[in-house]
Image (cartoon, grey):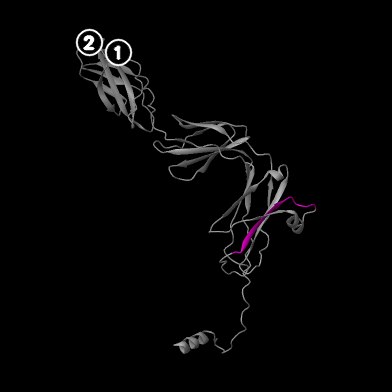
Amino acid sequence: MRIAVIILAGAAGFTGCGYIGEPLPPALNIPSRVTDLRAVEFGDKILAEFTLPPLTTEGLALKSVRSVELRVGVGPNPFSIEGWAASARRFEVPATGSGPLNFEMPAREWIGKEVIMAVRATGPKGKTSDWSTLFVLPITAPLEHPTGLKAENVERGVQLTWRGTGPRYRVFRSAGDENPERLADTDQPQYLDESRQFGTLYRYLVQAISGELTQSELSEPISITPMDTFPPAVPAGLTAVSSTNTIELAWERNTEPDFKGYNVYRSAEGGPLEKIASLIEAPTYSDRQIEPAKKYRYTVSAVDLTGNESQRSEVAEATAQ
């Protein structure tokens, strides 16, 4: 069996001309350079993120790295990558797992300065990649994070309010067990979330921002489950016209998307108002249960799909013929 294996392996090395080429040199396993380094100032920290390329400079799969270093510092004048690297502060980034790598470091020592950042990786054979694309980040005094975040269920959505001194604010929202996602930016310490869905649990957070690269820490979260407790508009323009054996009612149609129907109420000869029709869809009603010469008073309300009923309309009167 051993002989057969050797023969098969040898046969695979022959070409049509019967010549065995020179052996290939061993792979150097130099990681390709990182091309997606990005960072933001977050409170009093710098948050950096990047992805290690999956291939070496030879186009082979990069199975592991020995180390990853991130350097941060002010660039010399005139700028040179060697001069910058010599004076920049060095950080070791743990390279575990797959996907983007995240790293945070204190920003306080560079407040008021513009720092240059770059990253490089060392492969399994000790060969180091080129420096990544450079990322320039201005460092400012940390922004104060918003406080006192409140959420209120209002008819048009979820009304958020908070206290803060930021030039602008960013609102984040998560639904159920989802991770928070960026919802909107605003100039004011308030925001109306009109995209909410009734009956869904939402969690909101807010931060102060200055441009895209300077962010405060996040506020404390606030949770709310908005419910539909808001009735339709009160029907308008109710009229009552007496005709033979009937009194005809008409009013303006409601336009709410969750409208369901109208309730009609009637009073005879000054008595109490009683419901005589429920959830009719058309903005008209013919009352034939009347007695001649009696005076009737009518009012109408609107009801939505949740069962919320509006206030009753103004009263219309008519005397049966």
**245 to 201, vertically: above or below:** above
Estimate the x, y position of residue 64 in percent, counting from the top left. 57, 65
Name the secondary structure under disc 1: strand
Residue 70 part of the magenta segment = yes
Write the residue at 46% across / 88% down: 4
- Please report the bounds of the magenta region as a residue range: 65-77
Residue 187 part of the magenta segment = no
Mark sitting earlier along the chain (1/2): 2
Estimate the x, y position of residue 141 in percent, counting from the top left. 68, 39
Quadrant of the rendered image containing residue 280:
top left
**43 to 147, vertically: above or below:** below
Q: Which quadrant does the N terminus fall into?
A: bottom left
Name the amino acid, label 1: Glu
- Per the image, the residue denoted by label 2 is 294
Estimate the x, y position of residue 51 in percent, counting from the top left. 58, 57
Labels 1 & 2 near each other (Cβ < 8 A): no
Quadrant of the rendered image containing residue 315:
top left
Quadrant of the rendered image containing residue 231:
top left
**104 to 69, vertically: above or below:** above
Left or right: 210 as drawn, with respect to 156 = right
Please give the label number shown on residue 317: 1
Q: Which quadrant does the C terminus fall into?
A: top left
CA gap, disc 1 and disc 2: 11 Å
Name the secondary structure under disc 2: loop
Task: Choose between 13 and 314: the one closer to the eye.
Answer: 13
The residue carrying pointer 1 sits among few (fewer than 14), some (14 to 19) or many (20 or more) residues within 10 Å by Cα, namely many
Task: Choose between 17 and 210: the one closer to the eye.
Answer: 210
Estimate the x, y position of residue 204 in percent, counting from the top left. 50, 38
The residue carrying pointer 2 sits among few (fewer than 14), some (14 to 19) or many (20 or more) residues within 10 Å by Cα, namely few
